[in-house]
Image (cartoon, rainbow, N blue to C red):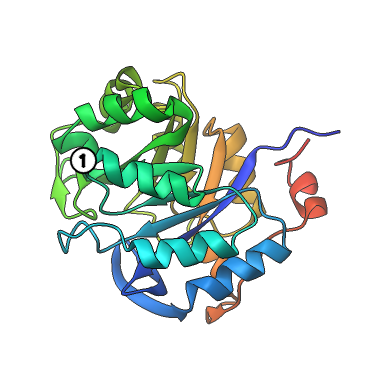
Amino acid sequence: MYLRPRVIPCLLLKNNGLVKTVKFKDPRYLGDPINAVRIFNEKYVDELAILDIVATKEKRSPNLELLSRIAAEAFMPMCYGGGISTLDEVKIILGMGFEKVVINTSAVKNPMLIQEASGHFGSQSIVVSIDVKKNFFGKYRAYINCGEVATDYDPAELARKVEQLGAGEIFLNSIDKDGTMSGYDLGLIKKVSESVGIPVIACGGARNVDDLSMALHNGKADAMAAGSMFVYYGKHKAVLITFPNEEELIKAGVFT
């Protein structure tokens, strides 16, 4: 037996396609998300995060038809985020078979949704995504609306608030690190992880299994999510869906 922190591929959706961004910009089309889910099935991943990066910006609800097809293909636990603003949407998505929903903009604009959703469906089903970028003065600030609108919240302050409202996990996404494959923002992860008692999923910047280990041991993350690391191969970033095997994760100290 060994301890097994979760390692979570994060798949981004735009216009029903699988894309990858850099610092939340310039989405590159990678292919069919259903095919990616099928490959991750074969690789026995711990969990998948599916995020629609334009639903909130387009002021529309989640694409339930696409989510239903994804849920029908996936054999692993999944969470979905993007455009969720009502209790009914949370109910429908969980009813499809997703284990968790990820809420970002509504957590700031309508924080009672977190309280109501966790009360109805349990805290374990409610994840709050906190997208973070440094401002002109080098201070961390939480962003909403797909990283386009700054809030007055320090990410640790917002994490404590949503924990009190009933959120079961924090999905902590560094906008500055997104897609750069330059390593996680360990200072940010540690700052938020030490501010709350609920699990923190680190995301943004991972390039290899050593970065996963650093986020776990130095950043004190409870789980590690990544996008580019699992969809690109080589210095020219050829598209290849991949996932480290257990031996690699044990050698890097992710599994012990």
> What residue appears at the point 70 percent right and 41 percent down from the top-left corner?
254
> What residue appears at the point 65 percent right and 48 percent down from the top-left corner?
46
Residue 53 pos. (x, y %):
30, 61
Decide: few, some or many residues near mark 1? Use Cα within 10 Å; few <14, some 14-19, many ≥20: many
Whether 104 is drawn above or below 55: the answer is above
**Residue 237 in view of the camera:** yes
Residue at the extreme right of the image, as rendered: 1
Residue 225 pos. (x, y %):
52, 49
Whether 154 is drawn above or below 250: the answer is above
Side of 134 where 69 appears, left or right: right
Q: Nearer the viewer, residue 243 or 45?
A: 45
Whether 123 is drawn above or below 75: the answer is above
Whether 95 is drawn above or below 205: the answer is above
> What residue appears at the point 41 percent right and 30 percent down from the top-left corner?
121
**Mark 1: amino acid:** Ser
Quadrant housing residue 142: top left
**Residue 138 in view of the camera:** no
Q: Quadrant of the C terminus?
A: top right
Q: Quadrant of the N terminus?
A: top right
> What residue appears at the point 53 percent right and 78 percent down from the top-left corner?
237
Residue 6 pos. (x, y %):
62, 42
Q: Nearer the viewer, residue 230 or 99?
A: 99
Q: How many marks?
A: 1
Quadrant housing residue 135: top left
Residue 247 pos. (x, y %):
82, 52
The residue that disc 1 covers is 106
Query: For the residue labelled by badge 1, is the local secondary structure a helix, a strand or a loop?
Result: helix
Side of 122 where 57 appears, left or right: left
